[in-house]
Image: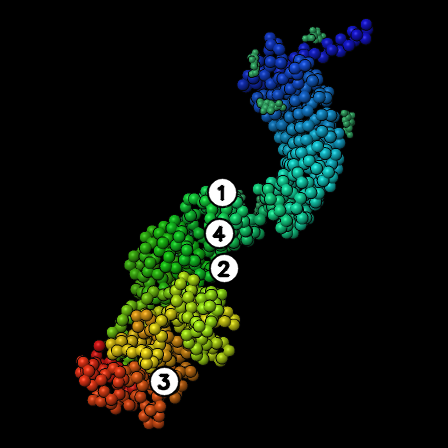
Amino acid sequence: MASFSLAVAVVRSNNITTDQSALLALKAHITDDPYNFLTSNWSTSTSVCNWIGISCGAKHQRVTALNLTHMGLTGTIPPHVGNLSFLTHLSFRNNSFHGSLPNQLASLRRLEVVSFGMNNFSGELPSWLGFFPKLQVLYAYSNSFSGSIPLSLYSNASSLQIIHLGENMLSGMIPRSLGNCTSLKEIHLDDNYLTGELPLEIGNLQNLMEITLANNSLTGTIPNAIFNISTIEVISLYLNQFSGQLPLSIGHWLPNLKELYLWDNELKGIIPNSISNASKLTQLELGNLSTSLEEFFAFNCNIKGIIPVGIGNLSNMMALHLEDNELAGPIPSTVGGMRNLQGLFLQHNRLQGSIPIDIDLSWNQLSGDIPTSIGGLDSLANLSIAHNKFQGPIPQSFDKLISMVFLDLSHNNFSGVIPKSLMELKYLKYFNVSFNRLQGEIPFGGVIGKFSAQSFMGNEALCGPPQLQVPPCKSSNIGHSKTDAERDMNKLKIQGDLLPLATWRRISYFELELATYGFSESNLVGKGSFGSVYRGTLSDRSSVAVKVFNLNIEGGFKSFEAECDVLCRIRHRNLVRIISSCSSMDFKALVLEFMPKGSLKKWLYSHNYFLDIQQRLNMMIDVASALEYLHHGCPLPVVHCDLKPNNILLNKDMVAHVSDFGISKLLGDEDSMTQTMTLATIGYMAPEYGSQGIISTRGDVYSYGILLMETFTRKSPTDEMFDGEMSLNRWVKESLPHAVIEVVDANLLKRGEDYFTAKLDCISSIHYENGYGLFNRGS
Ligand SMILES: *[C@@H]1O[C@H](CO)[C@@H](O)[C@H](O)[C@H]1NC(C)=O
Ligand SMILES: *[C@@H]1O[C@H](CO)[C@@H](O)[C@H](O)[C@H]1NC(C)=O
Ligand SMILES: *[C@@H]1O[C@H](CO)[C@@H](O)[C@H](O)[C@H]1NC(C)=O
Ligand SMILES: *[C@@H]1O[C@H](CO)[C@@H](O)[C@H](O)[C@H]1NC(C)=O
Ligand SMILES: *[C@@H]1O[C@H](CO)[C@@H](O)[C@H](O)[C@H]1NC(C)=O
Ligand SMILES: *[C@@H]1O[C@H](CO)[C@@H](O)[C@H](O)[C@H]1NC(C)=O
Ligand SMILES: *[C@@H]1O[C@H](CO)[C@@H](O)[C@H](O)[C@H]1NC(C)=O
Ligand SMILES: *[C@@H]1O[C@H](CO)[C@@H](O)[C@H](O)[C@H]1NC(C)=O
């Protein structure tokens, strides 16, 4: 009987009434219930099992869950809560409870899920948290708990699956007994003051999916074992003092890894390639690479999302390959922060919006040509590439940069002319091309014309109006000749205008090899002492002549240099245009406009070809006009030195072009008469200059006279009939004016043919004087 009544007493001492009193005690400790969740609802007039936040077990009618999540409550937890002896779920999450946890809670032996997270609890985390045999989930994050994490938690709680104690003030070390929590799936201890090393026993946690220990003061190496846990999805260890290197095999055993954060540690060494085997990885943060990253390749990776704004902090990035992904949204304007960027590859994405408006790359060592594709940046307002080493021409395509307001190209190596097209930039407020190697006329009028001398200083040979403090431009139609002969040459009708300077780009050996079928015999169109000329077809299908210099012969290298030097500076419709050059230690080539009709020599002397009087006259005018330009229209006079039918090439319209500047000279002021000529062709060289080894523009004029005579007589000055006393020059001279018919090319003029007299008159009008061929009147 006594034993029976004792049993009843036990039952009575702990029934639903006990639970009710415990909850009413809790209600009494709540000092603020702003939304009145409990005020009227937790009333003794209804069963506790109907109260908000309360669940009861069906069998015992006892409180099994107390869930006050996110009710805005302020208060403390009274010891009475420890009487809710059937409680399995307890949550105070996201309120403003404060104070410490009463030890009486230790008697809640059935607890499985506990959350104190997101409150203002303080004091030490009690060791009894480790005494609940069925505890699976413990949330105590985002409070002010201090002290070390109780050992009991690690040692006893074999059923624990989730520990979340982040954002507290916990200190001390992570004990080796962590390895006992073999059921653990998640452990989050971020943002505390934990110290010491991460125990190797972490490798025992073979069910672990997430470990986040970021922002503590953990040291030592990261145990390799952590990278052997195949279930793991998230590893976040950033902002610690982990040191050493990552294991090379890091990626081999992480088939489920989605996120890896290791930045801001003291890790060193390489980023192991094997990481690419972690095929589910979506977040990889290896730290502050903001100044060290130079190249980044992530093309064709199915990357989705936007380009982060922080990309601009990669201040040393040189090549960023993000092409062939699924990036969307705008290109952040911060890309300009990548000041060393030489290649930004974003093609084949889904980017939208405008191009970031400013590009400031000034004060670098950037070099090379400006890609013409820059013209695509039509919303670019501000481009400063001053103080670099850019070279080549200012692209014509700059005229497409219609939004341009500020354009600073100063202190580079830009050459060629200022493209007239820049006058299209109607919003331009600042323009600076000072300190380059520009030449030619400063485009007058339009927007460029309004800038001052300060915008054009320190160039090689710009010309224009006096207020820009540059010399006046020489008109190509106005002569500046000193001799009668030269003045007379200027009477020649000058055909065509100067063309704008070519976009002179460099070309690779490989491109030339492709263009000429590997410099094959079948593409060879000429061979001389200087080297060989091949016909080629560039990738844009244009036909070119590739002149490959023979560097084995003496003067071969000089010849390339001379021709480059001259051709790069000059431009005329009757000069063969240079398209590109290719230069390395042991290979030098010029890529020239292809002249499909071959040389004047071929047309004069081959039986399959014939030139009529008009064609010959036109060609001679072409050559004269080229010479006049070389001698008077260039920044420095150019002496060709080797004018002869072989070097007069014809384009498809039979327009003559002077070619082969291999031995030409640029005449400065002092050296105009003193340079030695070595390689010019006998017969075309003025005797008085040749014998003294002196060259001048007059030498070219002499050669021109010989060329003129040869063209109409079809007799080369080296013909065998000209030996000893007789020369082409003398032969022609003696036949004039009455015996022209004796010397003129018999194919041109036959007695008795139609218009004989008119033709004879025409040819007779070609005079020569003192060895210099002249036209007496136009044709
Ligand atoms: C609970 O137990 C007390 C005695 O401890 C008793 O007075 C009360 O009637 C019991 N209540 C219920 C609902 O059994
Ligand atoms: C208390 O709240 C619960 C859950 O919202 C509700 O079902 C019950 O009717 C409420 N009781 C009272 C007395 O308001
Ligand atoms: C507590 O209630 C919230 C909703 O109010 C719910 O999301 C949460 O899962 C509950 N927690 C527990 C431990 O039952
Ligand atoms: C394990 O839990 C029991 C209570 O269940 C406790 O007495 C014991 O001290 C705990 N062991 C450790 C190592 O904390
Ligand atoms: C990253 O590194 C740079 C240079 O070393 C430093 O100035 C910057 O503060 C670092 N940023 C962070 C978030 O540590
Ligand atoms: C870039 O760097 C600046 C200054 O160092 C910093 O304030 C900013 O947060 C960084 N941006 C990103 C997205 O990292
Ligand atoms: C362009 O850049 C210059 C110099 O960096 C700056 O002074 C100016 O305000 C910028 N102008 C525009 C239109 O962005
Ligand atoms: C252009 O740049 C040069 C060199 O930096 C400078 O001296 C000059 O003042 C600049 N011109 C203008 C108009 O700002």
Report whether the residue tagged 4 is closer than 8 Å to ligand 6: no
Image vertical order of residue 201 relative to residue 335, above or below: above
Q: For residue 345, which numbered disc appears in the image?
A: 4
Extreme-top residue of the structure? 1
Q: Earlier in the sequence, mark 2 or mark 3?
A: 2
Q: CA distance from mark 4 to mark 2?
A: 21 Å
- The kind of residue on which mark 1 rests is Ile
Between marks 4 and 2 in the image, the one whose residue lies nearer the viewer:
4
Q: Is residue 635 visible?
A: no
Q: Which residue is mark 1?
A: 306
Q: CA distance from mark 2 to mark 3?
A: 47 Å
* Nearer to the camera, 532 or 116: 532
- The kind of residue on which mark 4 rests is Phe
Q: Residue at x 35, y 88 (%)?
A: 719
SS at badge 3: loop
Asked which quadrant contains residue 55, the reply is: top right
Q: Earlier in the sequence, mark 4 or mark 2?
A: 4
* 183 horizontally vs 310: left or right: right
- Neighbor class of circle 2 (other Cα within 10 Å; few <14, some 14-19, many 20+) is few
Q: Residue at x 37, y 57 (%)?
A: 397
SS at badge 4: strand
Between marks 1 and 2 in the image, the one whose residue lies nearer the viewer:
1
SS at badge 2: loop
Q: How many marks?
A: 4
Q: Which residue is mark 3?
A: 685
Asked which quadrant contains residue 391, the reply is: bottom left
Between marks 2 and 3 in the image, the one whose residue lies nearer the viewer:
3
Whole-percent x, y for residue 621 in the image:
27, 76
Q: Residue at x 62, y 50 (%)?
A: 273
- The kind of residue on which mark 3 rests is Met
Q: Earlier in the sequence, mark 1 or mark 4?
A: 1
Q: Which residue is mark 2?
A: 365
